[in-house]
Amino acid sequence: MARWGRWLGLTALFLALVSLSITLTINALWLYRLNISWLDISHTVDLSTRRLMENYRQLLGYLELPWVTTLNMRDFPTSYTGMIHFEDVKRLFLLDHVVLLITIGPAIWYLRALKQRAEQWRLLRPMQVAAVVPVVLGGCLAVNFNGFFIAFHQILFRNNDWLFDPQLDPVINVLPDTFFLQCFVLAFLLFEAGVGAAYWWARRAIRRATDPTTPRNTDA
């Protein structure tokens, strides 16, 4: 495999892992349902778990589905600035899904090419380096989540519309900071799991290749 092919394949693999981790986190409805109980959100806004989940699905439907162009939550009105922010979030979510769709095929092709050439060892160092990133970011979360959260929004958004006024955008009352913290942690863990799986696969291939008891295919 040419050097440029390896770089493209590795880039596609990393992008696929990142975008898949984000997609799985976005759609972790179970995590929000757990938070409704853990944080007693129903009591805060006097809505049942079923109604809160209905509103949350309506929000996710708008953010993830290109053909849903209007945000209509049953129990939570949205201000003008709130709508601008959700439009920005929608663009980021759709970009993530597009990246996943574009990179998943090349990533699988790259892994198959490595297996065919018995070059899984090429994944070892890149996976070791990639595994450090979530650890560093996780450390930042642990030290100062508010600072991390603010910096995250300042990097991704061109305005301050993400600073919701609970009087104008009451949905913020049912999306506490603790839930967002858990989403970041979940995304980091999912990425680490993907990186770990790739590293384990490479190590396993090396062990099999160097094990004298492993059967080898021989030409007749």
Image (cartoon, rainbow, N blue to C red):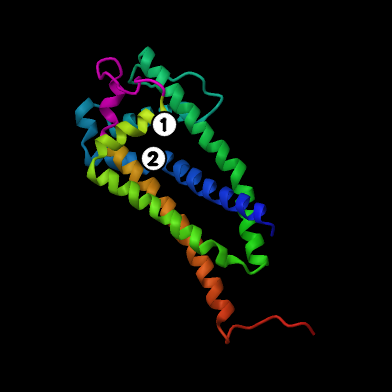
Looking at the image, how many numbered discs can be counted on the residues?
2
Foreground pick, 119 / 62: 119
Task: Give the left or right position of residue 201, taking residue 36 as reference.
Answer: right
Q: Quadrant of residue 193?
A: bottom left
Q: Crowding near pointer 1: few (<14 within 10 Å), some, many (20+)?
A: some
Using the numbered discs, state the Cα–Cα distance from disc 2 to disc 1 in whole angstroms.
8 Å
Q: Crowding near pointer 2: few (<14 within 10 Å), some, many (20+)?
A: some
Up the image or down, 220 lies above or below 67; here it is below
Q: Give the range drawn in magenta.
A: 158-177
Q: Is mark 2 on a helix, strand or loop?
A: helix
What residue do we see at 35% from left, 42% from top? Answer: 184
Contact check, label 2 and label 1, Cβ < 8 Å: yes
Q: Residue at label 2?
A: 29
What residue do we see at 38% from left, 20% from top? Answer: 159
Q: Which SS does the magenta portion mostly show?
A: loop
Q: Residue at label 1?
A: 57
**In this view, which residue lies farthest toward the bottom?**
213
Foreground pick, 206 / 30: 206
**In this view, which residue lies farthest toward the right?**
220
Foreground pick, 220 / 28: 220
Query: For the C terminus, which image quadrant?
Result: bottom right
Q: Quadrant of residue 73?
A: top left
What residue do we see at 51% from left, 61% from top? Answer: 198
Query: For the N terminus, which image quadrant?
Result: bottom right
What residue do we see at 53% from left, 77% from top? Answer: 207
Q: What element carries label 1?
A: helix
Which residue type does callout 1 highlight? Arg
Which residue type does callout 2 highlight? Leu
Q: In which quarter of the image is residue 76?
A: top left
The x, y position of residue 77, in whole percent, is: 34, 16
Question: Is residue 58 on the magenta stretch?
Answer: no
Q: Earlier in the sequence, mark 2 or mark 1?
A: 2
